[in-house]
Image (cartoon, rainbow, N blue to C red):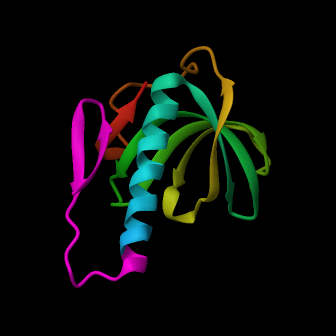
């Protein structure tokens, strides 16, 4: 059993003998990423990742499953590429994010406009 922990809840993964080693390590890597995202929200660390053609730096506020059924991150983009040319509040589909890095840089407080219990999420793993 491989677990990750967010908001006082354990999320488990049961390996089975038919699962290939590649699938096992992919699943392990995914669980590590989920735990790191939860920790970055809890500790208010910036996250950098490649998304939709360029690198972005964001202040993560809420991580979970969106109402569309995707793994999502509600974050305030502070730097980097933006297809709209604007910084600000965005919902990122994490299946489209690559090369995710948790930065040592912290942000001080939740951004104005963030509402706890994000209505864009059907299930929240972690939020500020």
Place residue 104 in its image quadrant.
top right
Tell me how many marks there are.
0
Q: Compared to 79, does 23 lie above or below?
A: below
Q: Please identify the quadrant where the C terminus is shown.
A: top left
Say which residue appears at 34% left-offset and 83% top-offset. 20
Q: Nearer the viewer, residue 111 or 48?
A: 48
Say which residue appears at 56% left-offset and 38% top-offset. 75
Q: Position of residue 58 (x, y in %)?
A: 65, 38
Q: Position of residue 8 (x, y in %)?
A: 24, 30
Side of 63 where 44 appears, left or right: right
Q: Compared to 94, does 74 lie above or below?
A: above
Q: Position of residue 119 (x, y in %)?
A: 34, 39
Q: Is residue 76 visible?
A: yes
Side of 118 where 13 appears, left or right: left
Say which residue appears at 19% left-offset and 64% top-offset. 14
Q: Position of residue 95 (x, y in %)?
A: 50, 64
Side of 86 where 10 appears, left or right: left
**What's the magenta region?**
1-23
Say which residue appears at 30% left-offset and 39% top-offset. 5
Q: Compared to 110, does 121 lie above or below?
A: below
Residue 32 painted magenta? no
Q: Please identify the quadrant where the N terminus is shown.
A: bottom left
Residue 6 painted magenta? yes
Q: Is residue 114 visible?
A: no
């Amino acid at each position: 059993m491989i677990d990750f922990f967010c908001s006082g809840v354990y999320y488990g993964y049961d390996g089975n003998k038919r699962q290939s080693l590649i699938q096992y390590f992919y699943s392990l890597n995914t669980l590590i990423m989920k735990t790191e995202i939860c920790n970055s929200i809890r500790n208010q660390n910036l996250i950098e990742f490649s998304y939709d053609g360029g690198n972005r730096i964001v202040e993560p506020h809420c991580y979970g499953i969106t109402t569309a059924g995707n793994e999502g991150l509600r974050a305030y983009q502070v730097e980097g590429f933006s297809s709209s040319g604007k910084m600000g509040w965005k919902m990122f589909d994490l299946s489209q994010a690559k090369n995710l890095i948790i930065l040592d840089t912290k942000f001080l407080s939740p951004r104005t406009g963030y509402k706890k219990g994000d209505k864009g999420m059907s299930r929240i793993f972690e939020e500020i």
